[in-house]
């Protein structure tokens, strides 16, 4: 089974609950089999940024503790899930998967000064997100800002590989296909 081979399927929005479940399982694998290879496959619409940062830091730390951490994307790695894929030492994406990169979105209510403080904090979070993507790709912070300004940026697997957002694309052709669908 995937669990015996340390493959975790993250098939839900990024929430404190889904992150907590992932951390619990990955912690058990870490304790039972120190330095084992661990793979996390994301098919997620994204979600809570702060909960996502908890998992991002946890995955990076597993790598520092001797695990080979591989991250993958099937279906979609949207928003925070796309950021989480960047935590892998090896990152892959299935042929028909999609990334979504966009500016941080938050809901807020309160007094004017509270909302102004929240906007400043969100801007700081966005700078961290930009630096994560820039550090793991061929893109600069400025290029990402330009592409995501006031819109959603959907990226297919070929473009993700070209931009360095993943290291490999898996599933390049359909069985019995007359030509590679990547052409």
Image (tube, grey):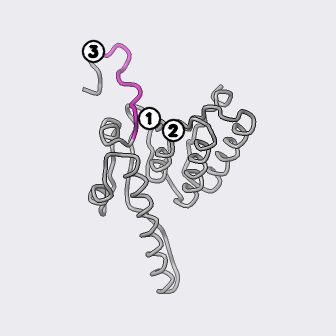
Residue 173 within the magenta-colored segment of the rendering? yes
Furthest-right residue in this view: 32
Give the mark nearer the N terminus: 1 vs 2.
Answer: 2
The residue mark sitting in front, 3 or 2, is: 2
Write the residue at 46% across / 65% down: 125
Per the model, the C-alpha gap separating discs 3 and 1 is: 25 Å
* Residue occupying the point 52% across, 82% down: 110
Where is residue 135? Give x, y as percent.
40, 50
| Mark 3 or mark 2, earlier in chain | 2
How far, Cα to Cα, is label 3 from label 2? 30 Å
Where disc 3 sits, the SS reads loop
Using a 10 Å C-alpha cutoff, classify the residue at mark 3 as few (fewer than 14 neighbours), some (14 to 19) or many (20 or more): few
Quarter of the picture holding the N terminus: top right
Q: Position of residue 164 (x, y in %)?
A: 35, 41
Q: Residue placed at 29% from the left, 59% from the top?
A: 142
Query: Which residue lies under the disc numbered 3?
Result: 178
The image shows residue 87 at horizontal and vertical percentages of 51, 45
- Asked if the residue under mark 2 is in contact with the one under mark 1, i.e. CB atoms within 8 Å, the reply is yes
Query: Disc 2 marks which residue?
Result: 71
Please report the bounds of the magenta region as a residue range.
Answer: 166-177
Outermost residue to the left: 183
Query: For mark 1, what is the residue?
Result: 92
SS assignment at label 2 = strand
First along the sequence among labels 3 and 1 = 1
- Are circles 3 and 1 on residues that touch, CB within 8 Å? no
28, above or below 153, in the image: above
> Is 39 included in the stretch rendered in magenta?
no
């Amino acid at each position: 089974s995937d669990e015996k081979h340390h493959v975790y399927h993250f098939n839900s929005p990024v929430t404190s609950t889904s992150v907590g479940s992932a951390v619990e399982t990955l912690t058990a694998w870490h304790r039972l089999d120190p330095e084992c290879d661990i793979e996390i496959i994301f098919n997620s619409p994204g979600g809570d940024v702060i909960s996502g940062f908890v998992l991002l830091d946890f995955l990076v730390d597993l790598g520092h503790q001797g695990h080979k951490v591989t991250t993958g994307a099937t279906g979609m790695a949207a928003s925070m899930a796309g950021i989480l894929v960047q935590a892998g030492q090896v990152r892959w994406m299935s042929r028909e998967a999609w990334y979504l990169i966009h500016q941080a979105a938050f809901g807020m209510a309160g007094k004017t000064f509270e909302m102004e403080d929240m906007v400043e904090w969100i801007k700081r979070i966005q700078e961290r997100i930009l630096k994560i993507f820039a550090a793991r790709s061929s893109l600069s912070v400025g290029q990402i800002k330009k592409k995501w300004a006031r819109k959603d940026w959907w990226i297919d697997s070929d473009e993700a590989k070209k931009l360095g957002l993943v290291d490999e694309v898996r599933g390049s052709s359909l069985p019995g296909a007359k030509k590679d669908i990547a052409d």
